[in-house]
């Protein structure tokens, strides 16, 4: 269970990195994409290296007790630098100021990494500790300074990142906002992690034993933090994709009445059938193409006078001008389909003052609105009139 507390967030960060990898390869010169990719990769490395089984394996391979300590702390410090660099690039601004801030972060945290390695080299830590190194060596010269240094560097970075992200939340919306809010929650958990660790170390300095805070409380908090931050990075991308697919599927379904109206009357409409498991965007594109092809073939049968009548009738029904346009377009489409299939018009030619006057639409039909308007009473009345004319003609 203790190992899972580390490997699960490592896996989440790795998955988030892999999801971002295509964009990273495509925009490999983009500082923002590089910052996101670097942060996720380093976060996965932090949790993987901090797991007790990994710590034991690294110590065994190197033959140096507690060699994993400076390694994990150095990678964690690199994660801190990545957080700050990401926020700097996210906020944007003067490119020279962004580059200057990036170099400053790299310089400061690189110096911290060097200091961590030097302090470990100067310290004496012969007893291997897999889970409680921070408290076990809290009063050991140089180890004490190394522990305080990495916690301080981590705390400064997460506090600064939390503040900057929270300020940014007010200026963004949608899935990106939700993702950044999750990231803020994750960084707040990091602050809790640092507080717990500091409390356990300070307790050792004052002769108390609060080691359970470091060994039992801090790891689950860090694990939850990693998962939340990883989800924060995943949410904007996956949420936008899911929303786009849902909108495409919804539009695809809403266009079905119009597609069916044209399919049986216009040869060639809907001939190309795609598997149901095809991406919704592809299915929608195919359905739109089918409908446009059908409407193009019906253009000679569109009746300008009928459209004016349907538009006026729709307005009397209480429709808005936009709704009346869709109802009128649906009406001429239904009548054009009937004319194309050889059925008599809903109004006798004499009542219309002659043959129907064809017209070309001045604007593209709003396909979704027209598809929904096929069920409107004005259109239904035209269908009934056509049915009555067909019955009269048949008798």
Image: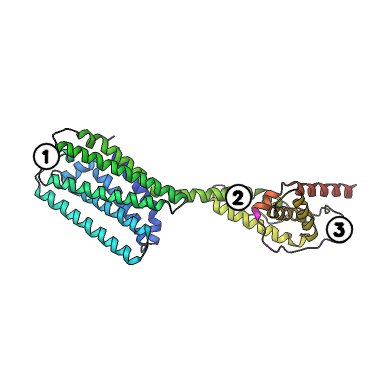
Q: Classify mark 3: residues with Cα within 10 Å, few (<14), some (14-19) or many (20+).
A: few
User: Nearest the camera: 307 or 371?
Assistant: 307
> Marks 2 and 3: CB-CB under 8 Å?
no
Q: CA distance from mark 3 to mark 1?
A: 101 Å
Q: Which structural element holds mark 3?
A: loop
Q: Is residue 110 magenta?
A: no
Q: Nearer the viewer, mark 3 or mark 1?
A: 3
Residue 269: name its quadrant: bottom right
- Residue assigned mark 2: 252
Q: Earlier in the sequence, mark 2 or mark 3?
A: 2
Q: Is residue 312 visible?
A: yes
Residue 35: image tag: none
What residue range appears in magenta? 351-367
Quadrant the N terminus occupies = top left
Residue at image position (32%, 67%) is 96
What x and y, as percent, mark residue 335?
77, 54
Residue pointed to by mark 1: 127
Please give the name of the residue rendered at 22% of the width and 57% of the height, measured from the top-left corner. 108
| Foreground residue among 230 and 104 | 104
Q: Is residue 390 left or right of residue 147?
A: right
């Amino acid at each position: 269970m203790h190992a899972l507390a580390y490997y699960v967030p490592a896996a989440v960060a790795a998955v988030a990195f892999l999801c971002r990898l295509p964009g990273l390869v495509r925009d490999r010169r983009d500082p923002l994409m590089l910052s996101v990719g670097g942060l996720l990769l380093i976060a996965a490395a932090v949790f993987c290296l901090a797991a007790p089984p990994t710590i034991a394996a690294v110590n065994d391979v190197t033959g140096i007790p507690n060699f994993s300590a400076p390694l994990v702390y150095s990678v964690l410090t690199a994660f801190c630098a990545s957080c700050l660099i990401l926020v700097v690039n996210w906020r944007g601004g003067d490119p020279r100021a962004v580059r200057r801030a990036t170099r400053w972060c790299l310089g400061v945290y690189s110096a911290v990494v060097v200091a961590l390695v030097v302090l470990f080299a100067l310290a004496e830590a012969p007893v291997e500790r897999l889970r409680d190194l921070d408290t076990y060596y809290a009063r050991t010269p140089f180890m004490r300074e190394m522990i305080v240094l990495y916690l301080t560097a981590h705390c400064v970075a997460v506090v600064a990142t939390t503040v900057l992200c929270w300020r940014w939340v007010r200026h963004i919306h949608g899935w990106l906002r939700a993702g950044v809010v999750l990231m803020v929650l994750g960084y707040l958990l990091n602050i809790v992690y640092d507080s717990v660790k500091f409390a356990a170390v300070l307790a050792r300095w004052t002769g108390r034993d609060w080691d359970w805070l470091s060994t039992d409380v801090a790891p689950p908090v860090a694990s939850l933090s990693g998962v939340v931050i990883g989800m924060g990075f995943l949410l904007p991308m996956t949420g936008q994709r899911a929303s786009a697919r849902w909108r495409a599927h919804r539009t695809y379904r809403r266009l079905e009445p119009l597609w069916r109206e044209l399919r049986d009357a216009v040869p060639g409409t809907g001939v190309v059938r795609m598997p149901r498991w095809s991406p919704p965007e592809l299915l929608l594109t195919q359905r739109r193409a089918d409908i446009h092809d059908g409407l193009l073939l019906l253009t000679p049968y569109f009746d300008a006078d009928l459209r004016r009548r349907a538009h006026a009738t729709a307005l009397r029904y209480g429709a808005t001008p936009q709704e009346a346009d869709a109802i009128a377009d649906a009406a001429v489409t239904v009548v054009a389909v009937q004319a194309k299939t050889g059925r008599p018009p809903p109004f006798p030619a004499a009542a219309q003052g002659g043959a129907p006057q064809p017209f070309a639409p001045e604007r593209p039909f709003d396909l979704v609105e027209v598809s929904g308007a096929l069920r409107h009473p004005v259109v239904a009345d035209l269908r009934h009139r056509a049915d009555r004319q067909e019955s009269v003609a048949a008798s």
